[in-house]
Amino acid sequence: MPRIAEVRAPAEPSSPEQRARHLRILRAAARMGAEKGLERVQMHEVAKEAGVAIATLYRYFPSKTHLFTAVMAEQVDRFEESLPQPKPGTAPEDAVADVLVLASRQLLSRPALAIAMLQSANSANAAAVAGTGRIDRTFRQIVLRTLGIREPTVMDVTLIRLLMQCWHGVLQSSLNGLSSVPDTESDIRIACRLLLAPRSNAARRSDA
Amino acid sequence: MPRIAEVRAPAEPSSPEQRARHLRILRAAARMGAEKGLERVQMHEVAKEAGVAIATLYRYFPSKTHLFTAVMAEQVDRFEESLPQPKPGTAPEDAVADVLVLASRQLLSRPALAIAMLQSANSANAAAVAGTGRIDRTFRQIVLRTLGIREPTVMDVTLIRLLMQCWHGVLQSSLNGLSSVPDTESDIRIACRLLLAPRSNAARRSDA
């Protein structure tokens, strides 16, 4: 059985004031995570920095895992909103690689925050932490849109899931000092070409 | 810059007595990790269970990250020693998938320990934690031997690294309750076929 990280269901913001407070918390957590890393971030300091009561912070985010999974979900959402159009003439799998290289550069520019988000999202249990599913869904939308697939097959969804898992691993290696930036980017490009090869809108081979 | 987990260099066992004590520590940590999970394992309890002084434990393993990365390295070594021969007539990439499915079943049978090992290995910095590089090297040997490749190209090494990263991600999803056991195994098989397709000893396509 997977472990259950937390028993209590976190609150969701509903009014505009609540949403603004929620976003202030996420921004404060991102700043402090980038500066200090997951272990040294204190919940009471995040509350202070965001100008909210500690009880408010815990109502939305019962743990640092919840908090930094939500920070990641919010950053993935913002990334999706600012997504550039693929350059004309780029093969779809190379366009996906361009997007992932861009996202990787943004993530690796704040390594302590990247580690905090990836560790939290990795250890978050799907049932207990809301952001987990949202990150995966937004990632899938980004890849499908870049590939130009409107009606994904089951195989498309599987390939994109594998690509996300592989990408997380590549980022983790880079963050751990196991691979250089050029190697990281080259690994991402190879993973996109290989894992997206059987996608539903791939050009058919003449011998198929 | 990647973070440096620990400054102090851990000791390495050299005499037979030291190696026996080292192994006793790893076995005790594995038992306790399987039972309690990473967060609830206490270093002093591991020392007690292994029958060593707490100072001895810390000399070999300055942190739980070092300890559970070493537990993983030891388990990967034992897995390599017991590696079955591929069934005759199995395609090389399917033989690798069989090996990874077997390893996954063993890992997923003790989920709390699997989470402890993967989290530790993921957060271990290559420069500071010795087990990290060893896990990767042994994994590479296992895959190369199963593929029947004696002289790997740079591309072979890259493909195997991507496969390991992808496999870790698939395991993590399974451990987080994001994918079922049949989905996990099917994902592993697809990843092996796609990521190992351009390996150096792959059958050449007639149209290539």
Image (cartoon, coloured by chain):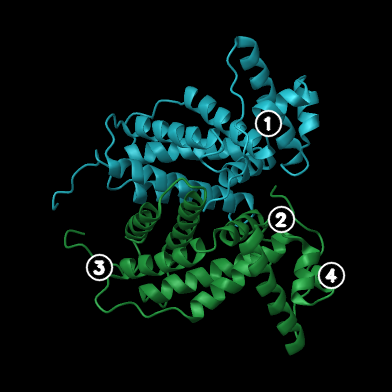
Chain colours: A cyan, B green
Mark 3 belongs to which amino acid? Ala
Image depth: mark 3 or mark 4 in front: 4
Mark 1 belongs to which amino acid? Ala
Residue underneath mark 2? B40
- Which chain is mark 3 on? B
The kind of secondary structure element at disc 3 is: loop
Q: How many marks?
A: 4
Q: Mark yes or no: residue A158 visible.
A: yes
Marks 3 and 4, how far apart at CA: 55 Å
N-terminal of the two: label 3 or label 4?
A: 4
N-terminal of the two: label 4 or label 2?
A: 2
Dots 3 and 4 on the same chain: yes
Marks 4 and 2, how far apart at CA: 17 Å
Residue sitting at 74 percent across and 54 percent down?
A: B4
Residue sitting at 72 percent across and 50 percent down?
A: B3
- Which chain is mark 2 on? B
Corner quadrant of residue B208: bottom left
**Residues at circles 2 and 3 in contact by the CB criterion of under 8 Å:** no
Mark 2 belongs to which amino acid? Arg
N-terminal of the two: label 2 or label 3?
A: 2
Residue underneath mark 3? B203
Q: Position of residue B84 (x, y in %)?
A: 40, 79
Marks 2 and 3, how far apart at CA: 49 Å
The kind of secondary structure element at disc 2 is: loop
The kind of secondary structure element at disc 4 is: helix
Q: Mark yes or no: residue B61 visible.
A: no
- Which chain is mark 4 on? B
Number of other residues with Cα within 10 Å of mark 1, as a class: few under 14, some 14 to 19, many 20 or more: many
